[in-house]
Image (tube, rainbow, N blue to C red):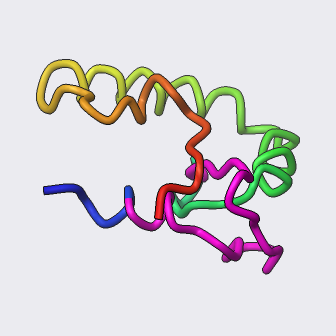
Amino acid sequence: MREKWEKDLACLVVCPRCGGKLEANAHRILSIYNHEPICMACKEKEEQRPDYEELSKNLIEQWLSDAEVHYGDLAGYFYHHFNPFKC
């Protein structure tokens, strides 16, 4: 069974952070700060924060480890960070 975050990410039509509308072909991504799905404009703002690089590196290392060792990555979410609308 898929987890709720996968559906939230794939079906996002309005960014919860900025309120911007997302078309079906717009990319979505999870925030590294609170793991909510956000639009790419909000992701670009995240990337400007001074702690982004270190936090991102640490989270990616942990996610890859968890995905490979414990769960596998059948949907490809950990390797394909930009996820299209799938609803």
**Is 53 placed above or below 27 here?**
above
Q: In terms of image quadrants, where is residue 16?
A: bottom right
Q: In terms of image quadrants, where is residue 12?
A: bottom right
> Is residue 72 left or right of 61 when viewed as pictured?
left
Q: In terms of image quadrants, where is residue 67?
A: top left
Please tell me whether the stretch drawn in magenta is mainly helix, strand or loop.
loop
> Is residue 39 left or right of 75 when viewed as pictured?
right
Assess whether residue 86 is covered by the magenta stretch. Answer: no
**Is 9 placed above or below 51 here?**
below
What is the x, y in percent for residue 9?
Answer: 50, 59
**Is 44 placed above or below 62 here?**
below
What is the x, y in percent for residue 38?
Answer: 66, 60
Residue drawn at x 75%, y 64% as measured from the top left: 23
What is the x, y in percent for residue 80?
Answer: 51, 28
What is the x, y in percent for residue 18?
Answer: 81, 74
Between 61 and 22, the residue placed more toward the observer is: 22
> Is residue 81 left or right of 1 when viewed as pictured?
right
Residue drawn at x 14%, y 20% as measured from the top left: 69
The span picked out in magenta is: 7-31
Between 86 and 34, the residue placed more toward the observer is: 86
Between 41 and 61, the residue placed more toward the observer is: 41
Assess whether residue 19 is covered by the magenta stretch. Answer: yes
Residue drawn at x 61%, y 38% as measured from the top left: 82
